[in-house]
Image (cartoon, coloured by chain):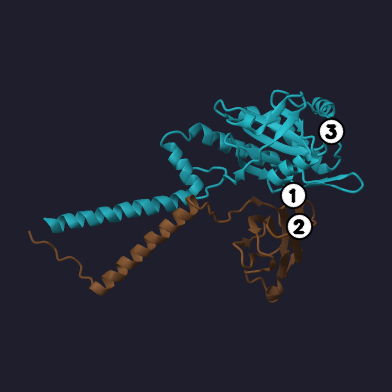
Amino acid sequence: MTEKQSMHIDPYEKNWIRLSIGLLVVFALAVTIAGFAMGIQVPSPEARVDPRTVADEGPWAEPGLRELAPGKYEAYVLAQTWQFTPREMTIPAGSEVTFYITSKDVQHGFKLQNTNINVMVIPGQVSKLSVKIDEPGRYDYICTEFCGLGHAAMFGTLIVE
Amino acid sequence: MSQRWKKIALYTFYTVMIIVVGGAFSFKVFQPIQVLPRIRLAPGFSVVMDDGERLTNEDMRGKLALYSFTYTRCQEPDCQRLIQTMLELQDKIDTVDFGGTEIQFVTITVDPEHDTQEALRAYAESIGADPALWHFARIDDPMLLKYVVGGGFETYYDEQEDGRIQLDPSFVLVDGWGIVRGEYHYRTLASDSDRILRHLDALAEEIRNSTGVASLAYEAAHYFLCYTP
């Protein structure tokens, strides 16, 4: 019985295939190490709310920054076309802020420049992320999801002093 | 011969890859196991309960705890809803099979000045709290209270100038390792009692089932973020 000739692959192409598989393995390892050893987690929806009434009562009725304890803050942020409420928050350097963000109309994004905070803001869901900022300065938070004509003007500032 | 073995090895490799990748994808998509997230470590604390006993976070090792935060003078609908939710949970807690693991409700007051030990006991009796399950507790030192409730349990409260207390009445679910597994700080689509009961069910199931090899499946559920809604 004769062996069937195996498929011919050009050596150049073969190397690229090896490289791509190698990259996939590296990425899978990176995700595993980030997840287990460094404890990095992707943001997952925290809870479901009713976007029609979320701004009527509870913490998003008066969104803003609140001090939980010395050096620890929480910020309830309401996104809507085309603004974030509040537009400006001030915290001392070295403190930790937990953001609870939701939208009352369409999909928005929340990215706090120069930090690890970047999350989608989906109507009906609450996005929660924490960050500790040591470096004083002005950190703008911008909408990263095209949400209409005023999208470019949708931003706010976190002042760390 | 070697050519043939090469082929077999290659096909075995492909098959294993397809099973692993396909398995991981379908595990994430269909989520046969759902768990509660491991959010962060619960704070250390020491409180005095309404029966005069001292309770610390170390006493709660190996037990589940549902902490809640309110104060007895509170007339806001949110506070009444919190007590109502706790009473509903007290009624339905027997429907959850914790497999022998104990659960305790601890309600910590954010107004220790008015909520003395006697006042808390009177309040617990007046609303019909089961003393075997549910205790009211206080921390005397306002600074410590702030660090435990605000800093640790991340529940916001603030005393206003006119003496009123602004508070988000909330619940925090902590497992036997002292890890926060659920936080309920604001109103959601599902009522708090439904959500907490569903979460208690999920936690109880994880405690009962995650032994031996099955515990790996539960770890996978954590890794793939298969969280109970």
> How many angstroms separate mark 2 from mark 1 (CA)?
10 Å
**Chain rendered brown:** A
Would you name the residue on which mark 2 appears?
A65
Q: Is residue B200 above or below residue A112?
A: above
Quadrant in the picture for residue B121: top right
Q: Which chain is cyan?
A: B
Chain letter for the residue marked with disc 1 in the picture = A
Residue carrying label 1: A68
Report the quarter where the N terminus of chain B lies.
bottom left
Tell me how far mark 1 sits from mark 3, CA to CA. Answer: 21 Å
Mark 2 is surrounded, within 10 Å at the Cα level, by few (under 14), some (14 to 19) or many (20 or more) other residues, namely some
Query: Which residue is the site of mark 3?
Result: B115
| Secondary element at tag 3 | loop
Amino acid type assigned to the residue bearing label 3 in the image: Asp
Classify residue B26 as left or right of residue B75: left
Residue B197 disc label: none
